[in-house]
Image (spheres, rainbow, N blue to C red):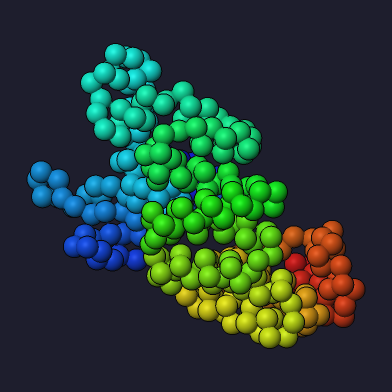
Amino acid sequence: MTTIIQAAKGGTYRFLRVRQINGQTRVLFRLLTARGGVNYHDWIVGTDARGRVRFQDAYVALTGEDMSQSIHRVYIIGAVQSHPTLLDRLTGADKQYAANLSTVSQIGRDLQAGNYSATLSSYQSLPQDLRENKSMMVVRLTAASKLRGQRPQDYRAAMSDFRRLFPHDACLDLVCLDQLFEAGEYADARRSIDRIEAFTGPDAHLDTIRGKMYRLQGGSANLSAAQKEYDKAIALEPTLHEPYWGLVYLSLQTKDFDRTVELLNRIQRELHVRIADLEKLPTYAEFVKSDAYRQWKAARAAKVQ
C-alpha cells in the first residue's frame, strides 16, 4: 500500500528484471519517490494451492528484510498490546521483542521525530540479541548516519557491526548513500553504488547518481565521466527523466548553450515534458543571456503562432 501511495504522489514503480536466486524465481522492481528516494522490492514468485503463479513475499532492500517479517513484527506489537497475557506464550525472538516493546516503540518514535541521539541511546539499552536483530540495526544505522558529522565514531561502529553480521546485504549501502553524497564523499558513495548494483544488476537510476557525482566534482575528466554515465542511463532506460536533466545541467556547467537547446528540444520531443519559464530560474541565468536561448525562444514563439 505504501508503494502505491508513493507512486501516486509522483513516484514511479518500475519492473527491472526476472532472476533466479537460490532456486527461487524473483522479480525485481525499483521504487523512486517524488523526492528522489530509491528502494528495491525483490518479489518471490511461487504458486498457490491451485498451481497458479503468485507473489509469495518480497525482500525490501531499504529495510533489509522480507515483507512477511515486517508484517509479523507489526502483528506481534498489535497482539501484545491488545492481549498482554500473550507475552507468556511467546518464545525466542518474538518473546524478546515483545518484552522490550516499550523501548522499541520509543526508538521508533524518536527516529520518526528526528531525535537521533535519543534513538541511539535507547538502542544501546536493548539486550544484545535484539541489538543484533537486523531491523533494529537498520534503525541504528539510519540514526547514526544522520549524526555522522557530529558523532563519526557511532557511524563507523554501526557500519562495521552491520557489515560484520550481514556482509552481503544491499540495505547498508542504501541507508548510507544519501549521507555520503551530501557530505561530498563521492569515492565512498560510488563504492556503495557498485555494491548496490551487485544486488540489482544494471540500473539507469544508479548510473544517473554516478553521473551527478562526477558532475558535482567538476574538472574535465569528471565532466567527461558524467557525460558517459548519463548517456549510459538513457540508453538503458530512455523514459527515465533524470539523466536528460543531468545532461542539461552539465551543458549549463560547461556553458555549451547550443547543447542546452538541443537537450531541451529532445526532452520536449521524446519525454513530452513542457519546459517552464527558464527566465525565472537562477540555474539558467547565464543561458537566458545567450544567443542560443534567444534563438530557441524565438523558434518556440514562432511555433505557437
Q: Residue at x 26, y 33 (%)?
A: 92
On screen, 135 above or below 220?
above
Q: Quadrant of the C terminus?
A: bottom right
Q: Residue at x 51, y 36 (%)?
A: 123
When asked about the image quadrant of residue 21, the answer is bottom left
Q: Quadrant of the N terminus?
A: top left
> Extreme right residue here?
289
Give the camera-side residue of 48 and 182.
182
On screen, 191 above or below 163?
below
Give the camera-side residue of 30 and 78.
78
Position in image of residue 94 (x %, y %): 30, 31
Is residue 102 found left or right of 277 in the rendered image?
left
Position in image of residue 8 (x %, y %): 51, 45
Give the camera-side residue of 87 and 129.
129
On screen, 103 above or below 15?
above
Q: Residue at x 71, y 74 (%)?
A: 217
